[in-house]
Image (cartoon, rainbow, N blue to C red):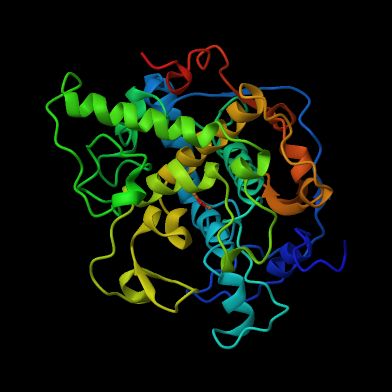
Amino acid sequence: SSSSPCTTADKVNEKILQCTDTSNQKPCPLVSPTAPVDFTPEGKVTRVRQPVHLLSREYQDKYKEAVGKMKALPESNPLSFKAQAAIHQAYCDSYYKYHKSSGSAVAKDDPAFDVHFSWIFAPWHRMYIYFYERALGQLIGDDTFALPFWSWDSPAGMVVPALFKGSFVNPLYDPNRNTKNLDALVDLDYLSHMKADPIDFKGPKDEKYKELVNKNLCTIYNQQVRKGPESFLGEKYCTAIEGNSGGSLERMAHTAMHVWVGKPETTPCDAAAGGVLSHKDGKFNCRNDMGFLGSAGNDPLFYSHHSNVDRMWHLWSTRLGGGQGITDTDWLDASFVFYDDVKSPRKVRIKFRDVLDTRNLGYTYDAEADRDLPWLRPKI
Ligand code: C2O
């Protein structure tokens, strides 16, 4: 109802679009005053997303080339890499709350808007990487280009993909990662004991290796097989930042891998040293990139990480019987505005109901490759 303080309405989004502060600490990604056009579903599926670790050499090069070109765009282009990262930042860590109030007292009717910690999480991020994927394809003139996913749910994908490593000559590289974890088998349950060092094992035959792989598969199973759509997708949005009502899709492997990859906060820093202001506590976060929501979009790995989060939602909808998910019209009719078309960016308004089936967005995941999901296999 309209009197509910917890409406997932597009009003909040409209406020963010009015952002005019272009100072460094509070990036203001959406600047065009023109009215958005409504999203039109793509007529056919032209893009099939593939796991990063199984990409052909040619596809790897394509991905690098596309992100390189996106990084070379002028920052005034809302589909430049910088601007894309700023969009994510604007929707994180109470950015809006502090933006409106210049860091001082916050009016009660002014929700601390965030795209995390509620049922907004899955559809918003699906939309975000959808437009990112389209922009990459446009930059290399290939409309079949599909955003590869970091397949941390399959044993062969349980390391930071080599494609993202190396040095600055690689557009997919990011220096702000936790070097301790970069070559280790991931721990999808990392959040429960973050202080621990990555386990030491001698190779895939090692018992400790097998144990962690199995533990990871269990984590994914527990994340994916839930009772009720809200348990998986999150609870109704209600000034999200104040309470944590995210679903298992967000809270488990997703968050663990953010913290796993990001550079830990070790030294104090400020804006000049590359820190990102936390609008929650007014402190600077020191080049954590993936490890801190506000800066996560700076790491190209973020987008392939979210491609897999998105795939987990897709598998839940299709393979696990979740279907369209939540039926509340407050969720279905919620909409956001994004930029589309890297050559002449225009605003597009898109509703949650538009994105519940990936085919509407012209992409899918390879069903054949996902026929035998290791985390769905019965235990031996
Ligand atoms: Cu917007 Cu993985 O976070």
Counting from the top left corner in percent of width and height, residue 322 is at 67, 30
Residue lying farthest to the left in this orientation: 202
Rendered image quadrant of residue 35:
bottom right
Can residue 38 be seen here? The reply is yes
Q: Number of callouts in the render?
A: 0
Quadrant location of the C terminus in the rendered image: top left
Residue 50 versus residue 177 in the image, above or below: above
- Which residue appears at 20% of the width and 42% of the height? 198
Q: Position of residue 170 (x, y in %)?
A: 32, 41
What is the residue that sits farthest to the right in this orientation?
2
Residue farthest bottom in this picture: 104
> Relative to 167, is 324 on the left or the right?
right
Horizontally, is 373 left or right of 57 in the view?
right
The residue lying at 53 percent from left, 73 percent from top is: 26
The one of 124 and 315 positioned closer to us in this rendering: 315
Residue 266: give x, y in percent of width and height: 23, 66
Q: Position of residue 243 (x, y in %)?
A: 57, 64
Name the image quarter holding the N terminus: bottom right
* Residue 152 shows up from this direction: no
Give above or below for 283 relative to 376.
below
Toward which corner of the image does residue 10 lie, by quadrant? bottom right
Residue 70 falls left or right of residue 192: right
Taking 347 as reference, is 205 left or right? left
Between 114 and 223, the residue placed more toward the observer is 223
Residue, x 38% and y 44% (percent of image)? 257
In the image, residue 365 above or below residue 133: above
In the image, what residue occupies the spot 36% across and 32% down?
216
